[in-house]
Amino acid sequence: MTVTTAKWTLDDYHLMIQVGLLKNRHVELLNGEIVEMPPEGPEHAQLSTDAGDYLRPLIGEKALFT
């Protein structure tokens, strides 16, 4: 027997969020698969901030930093 997994689109994923299907779940859409992910910890958050601070003057208005 061959098993084929369903791949989700970004629109599918956003709809699942909108209707509350993924409420209180820490997940990400990666290559069409919904993957359980732990919440971002303080070290990851700091590295993200540091990377943004480094790149912001180099990239300028070419990217949106949030």
Image: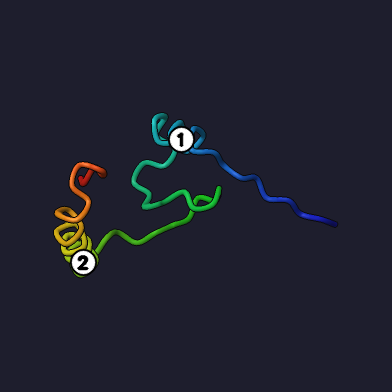
Q: Regarding mark 1 in the picture, which secondary structure is present there?
A: helix
x%, y% of residue 45?
A: 20, 62
Rate crowding at label 2 as few (under 14), some (14 to 19) or many (20 or more) other CA atoms within 10 Å: few
Q: Is mark 2 on a helix, strand or loop?
A: helix
Nearer mark to the viewer, of 2 and 1: 2
- Residue 60 disc label: none
The residue where tag 2 is placed is 47
Q: Nearer the viewer, residue 58 or 1?
A: 58
Residue at 18 percent across and 47 percent down: it is: 60
Total tally of numbered discs in the picture: 2
Disc 1 marks which residue?
Answer: 16
Front one among 8 and 52: 52
Callout 2 amino acid: Leu
Classify the position of the C terminus by image quarter.
top left
Please name the residue shown 17% across and 62% down the image: 54
Frontmost residue, 24 versus 31: 31
- Image coords of residue 53 (percent x, y): 14, 59
Amino acid under disc 1 = Met
Who's the residue at 54% across and 38% down the image? Answer: 9
Q: Quadrant of the N terminus?
A: bottom right
Seen from the viewer's position, the closer of residues 63 and 9 is 63
Would you place residue 11 above or below residue 64 in this image?
above
Q: Taking 50 as reference, is 32 left or right? A: right
